[in-house]
Image (cartoon, helix red, strand yellow):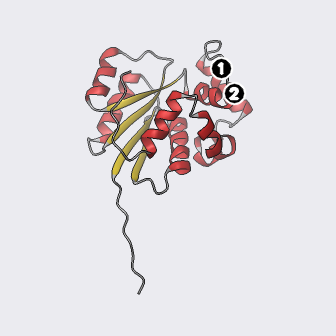
Amino acid sequence: MKRVTLRYAQLTVFAFGEAETEKAFLKHIRASYGRNTGLSVRVDCATGGAPQTIIDLAIRRSNGCFDRHFILLDTDITWPDETVTKAKKNNHELIPANPCIEGFLLSLLEPGIDLSLLTSSQYKKMFEQKYLNEEEKLDYRNYEKILPKSKLEKLRKTNQPLDTIICLMTEVKKRKPKDA
């Protein structure tokens, strides 16, 4: 009879996105990096809304049951100081998607793009026309075509939010949250 080896996660990670597009991107990162890391990563999301609402929901859903928590959040709406403080108090690291997830993804796909020129809705439209349409961007498997692991590895060297996401989802040693 074949002996079965059980694997246990050394650490658990709660990755939370503002909405479905962030969730799909985070699932792509998990799929690209998640094998044999010693981590168990749960990806969840809100349905958009104000930063305070999203952060409150992330804190409730994580329920203190994870070793590490982070929230990928758009910056097109200012994060209130008390909300940032609440996230820190509850050990949730905030990672900015500037100014929105589509703008963040465009900055990865088109290095040198000036993110101050357009609005979030214009970046969404641009991303959907050039890369993944409104429906495609919600399926994490589609991100492999535009952001394979080899490209992510190169990009993380120059993109701090991306590097932070990958580190939080792959490094077994405990990290202290960075000050926002």
Q: Which mark is residue 35?
A: none
Regarding residue 45, the answer to whether it shows in the image is no
Q: Is residue 70 above or below residue 119?
A: below
Examine the image and state in which quarter residue 93 appears. top left
Kindly identify the residue that appears in the image at 73 percent across and 31 percent down. Answer: 129
Residue count near mark 1 (Cα–Cα under 10 Å), binned few <14, some 14–19, many ≥20: few
Q: Amino acid at mark 2?
A: Glu
Q: Is residue 67 above or below residue 111?
A: below
Q: Amino acid at mark 1?
A: Gln
Image quarter where the C terminus lies is top left
Q: Report the side of 57 relative to 148 (left or right).
A: left
Q: Position of residue 127 (x, y in %)?
A: 67, 29
Q: Give the secondary structure at mark 1.
A: helix
Q: Earlier in the sequence, mark 1 or mark 2?
A: 2
Residue that mark 2 sits on:
110
Number of the front mark, 1 or 2: 2
Q: Is residue 149 above or below residue 36?
A: above
Q: Which mark is residue 122?
A: 1
